[in-house]
Amino acid sequence: MSGVFRVGEAAYDDFMGRYSVRLAPLFADFAGVRDGDRALDVGAGTGALTAELQRRGALVTAAEPSPEFAGALRQRFDDVHQAPAEELPFEDGSFDVALAQLVVAFMADAPRGVAEMARVARTVAVCMWGVQEHELFAAIDRTAQALGSERGEAGARRYRTLDEIRDLLAPLGEVETAVLDISAPYDSFEDFWHALEGQVGPAGAWLQSMDDEQRARAREEMHRQLGSPSGAFTLTGRCYAARVSTDARSAPVPTSDTSTSSSDSTKST
Ligand SMILES: C[S@@+](CC[C@H](N)C(=O)[O-])C[C@H]1O[C@@H](n2cnc3c(N)ncnc32)[C@H](O)[C@@H]1O
């Protein structure tokens, strides 16, 4: 697997967990997860969605290829497997629903990964942030452009539009889609920069590739790109979600291209 998620739990939660814990309830609603469902969280990371699924009474299994994250998940959850989406170690039809939150862009073979999810579950749901539609990634992109520096893994740009994730699931059946909007707070620009320096994901790898002087210029430019905040601020992200269900019972939520939003002012840990 890619090395960009071979990082500690705290660094991930600081950089992305503050967004993914806020996204998880919206995504679980969209997937139609119910009390008592057998649910598989694919690419579970540090457990933002796993915890939400458990909170709503699902019987949760987590699959995660990063040994660091699988170890962290085992501290919190009983049923954790270190495995990639492309090779899920489960029997056909083991789950009611399989979900991949912010994962498909990072799979080595996403069509195979979602086909595996459909093999083991009756409902498959996936979601990914847009790039320009997420203030964090858009600011990073503008900063990289302003500095003329190469940014991140090209592959991680896949499945970042509603059309792309709809097409990804289309071979599995009739696809429903939604747009999920959330926002997350930062205490200060220092809080933001500290999260970015945690070396998480393609953005962290981009920063890590710089020497001290380049990093100092990036810090200055990023501050400017965020509107030169002098205190607490909030960034908003838009996530594209798609779902396929072969389940006879219909889930309550989605109509096509439903837009849902959520924000709050509590920093996640
Ligand atoms: C942005 S994180 C999302 C983590 C978590 N789902 C969340 O919402 O916070 C992407 C995750 O995908 C995992 N991943 C990468 N390649 C994968 C693959 N082939 N199959 C499953 N997960 C994968 C990474 O290890 C990482 O945990």
Image: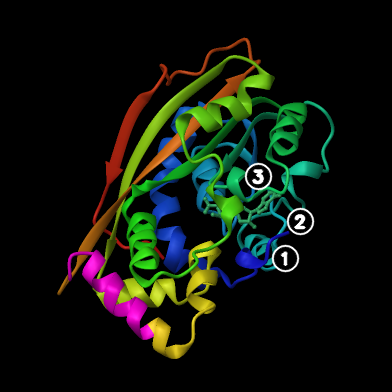
Residue closest to the eye, 82 or 155: 155
Disc 2 and disc 1: Cα gap in Å? 7 Å
- Magenta residues (range): 216-228
Quadrant location, the C terminus = bottom left
Quadrant location, the N terminus = bottom right
141 is higher (above) or lower (below) than 260: below
- Could you tell me which residue is drawn at 15 percent across and 74 percent down? 230
Q: Secondary structure at mark 3?
A: strand
The residue sitting at the top extreme is 248
Residue closest to the eye, 32 or 222: 222
Task: Describe residue 67's horizontal placement relative to residue 103 as left or right.
Answer: right
Q: Is mark 3 within 8 Å of ligand 1?
A: yes
* N-term mark: 3 or 1: 3
* N-term mark: 2 or 1: 1
* N-term mark: 3 or 2: 3
Give the residue number, with chain letter if any, for mark 2: 82
Task: Describe residue 217's horizontal placement relative to residue 56 as left or right.
Answer: left
- Could you tell me which residue is drawn at 75 percent across and 49 percent down? 84
143 is higher (above) or lower (below) than 58: below
- Magenta stretch, main secondary structure, is helix
Horizontal and vertical percent for residue 56? 49, 38
**Could you tell me if residue 104 is visible in this image?**
yes
Tell me the amino acid under the disc marked 3. Answer: Val
The residue sitting at the bottom extreme is 212
